[in-house]
Image (cartoon, rainbow, N blue to C red):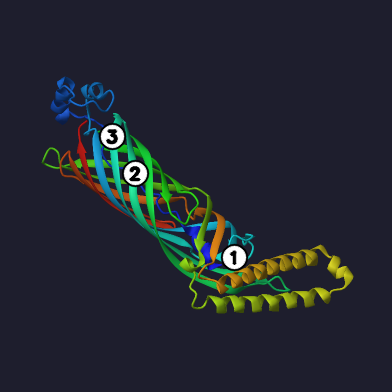
Amino acid sequence: MKCKKLISAFFLLCSIPFFGQVYTDKIVGEKNQQLKDSLKTEEYPYALPIWGEKVAQKGYKLPYSAGLSINYFWQDSQINISDLNVGFNNGPQFNLDEIVRFDKSSVEAGALTIRPDIWLLPFLNIYGIFGKANTATKINAGIWVPDADNNWSQVASFSTKANFNATTFGFGMTPTIGIGGGWLALDMNMAWTDISSLDKPAFSYVFGPRLGKTFKFHKPEQNIAVWVGAFRVHISGDTNGNIPLSDIFDLTNAQQKVDDGLTKVNENQTKVDDWWNGLTPAQQANPVNKAKHETANRALDRAGTFLTHLDGALSTAGSSSVQYSLQKAPKDMWNFIVGSQFQYNKHIMFRFEAGFLGSRTQFLGGLQYRFGL
C-alpha cells in the first residue's frame, strides 16, 4: 500500500511562479518633468506593445517589449490525498479512504525553466513556460482498523520516497500598473507537467498578486525592486496512473509488514466476532451496536482483502504493477512571498524570491535579458 500513496503525491510540483518584475511606469514628480516631456516627443521605435507609442507619449516609461528568462525554482509542499483506489496487475481496484491515514505526505521539486515573454499591451505581459524538473515524493502512511470497542489502531505502516523526472510546459499573463516606482502585478499561469508514470500530464494553476516599490540608483538604468505578495496554487484533483511495483516498493521488509498486518487484522476480526456473538438479540438490534459492527466488519474486510492482494503481488514483485486513482490537493492553498530584483541595466536583471508560512516553502532565482521588438 505504500506504493499507492507515493504515487498519489506526485505533483504539486510545477506550480511555479514566473512573474518577471518589469512594468510600465507612470512618470510623476517635478524632478522627473524633463524625462516626462522627452517621452511625449520621442518616437517609440518598437512594434510592441500595441499602443506603445501612444502610452509613452502620455508620460509612461515602458520596458523593452520582449525578454528571455532562465529560472531555477525549488519547492517543498505538503499535500492531502483522498478518494484513494489501488489495484495490482490490472486487477480490481480497492477504495482505501477508510483504512489509510497519511502523515505529512509531501512533494519536493526542483525545476529549471526558460520563460520567453512579450508585452502585448503596455499593461499586459504574456509568456511561455518550458522546463525540466526533478521531484521526490515522500509518503508516510499506515493501515488502520477498529476493534470491538471501535478503537482504531495501526496494523501496518509504510514510508517511502521515489524520484521522478518531468517536463513542464505552459503559459501565463501578468497585468501590471506602475506609478512613480510603486507597482501592482497580478501574475497567473497554467502549466502541465508530464511524467511517464501518469496517464496524463498534471495540471496546475498559479495566482500570485504582488505589491512592490522600485528604488533608483545613481546610474540612470540601475535600480532595485522589493515586493511582498501571496502565492496561491491549484492542481488538478484527478490523478490516474500505472507504475511497476518494484520501482517504488522497498522489498527488503515489505513481506514481513504485510504478514504482520494480516495477523493483526485476523486478531481484530476475532475480537469483533466474539463481541458481537456475546450480545443479546436486543443488544444486536441496538442501532449504535449495529453501526459499530458494520463499520468494523467493513474496515477489517477491506484491509484484509487489500493486504492479501498486495501479498500476491509481492510474490511476483519483479513483474507486478500498481494501478491507482486518487484526488490530491495542497494542504494550504496560499502562502506568503517576499522578493527582490536588481536591474543592472534595461537589458539585464537578477531576481530572487522566497515563499514561506503554511505548509509550503519555496525559492526562486532567475536571470532575465530584455530587448525591443
Could you tell me how far apart the alpha carbons at marks 2 and 3 are, in whole angstroms? 13 Å
Specify the quadrant that holds the C terminus.
top left
Residue kind at label 3, given as amino acid type: Ile
Residue 345 in percent (x, y) is at 15, 41
Could you tell me how far apart the alpha carbons at marks 1 and 2 are, in whole angstroms? 37 Å
Mark 1, residues whose alpha carbon is within 10 Å: few (<14), some, or many (≥20)? Answer: many
The outermost residue toward the left is 219
Quadrant hosting residue 369: top left
Depicted 30 relative to depicted 300: above or below? above
Q: How many labels does the image show?
A: 3
Circle 1 residue: 100
User: Which of marks 2 and 1 precedes in the sequence?
Assistant: 1
Label ID, residue 129: 2
Depicted 218 relative to depicted 243: above or below? above
The outermost residue toward the right is 281
Specify the quadrant that holds the N terminus.
bottom right
Residue 115 in percent (x, y) is at 30, 43
**Horizontal side of residue 294 vs 336, given as left or right:** right
| Front residue (pair 230, 153) | 153
Residue 263 in percent (x, y) is at 65, 79
Tell me the element at label 3: strand
Residue kind at label 1, given as amino acid type: Val
Residue kind at label 2, given as amino acid type: Ile
Q: Residue at x 51, y 66 (%)?
A: 245
| Front residue (pair 35, 51) | 51
Q: Which residue is drawn at 74% across and 78% down?
A: 270
Circle 3 residue: 118
Q: Residue at x 83, y 65 (%)?
A: 286
Mark 3, residues whose alpha carbon is within 10 Å: few (<14), some, or many (≥20)? Answer: many
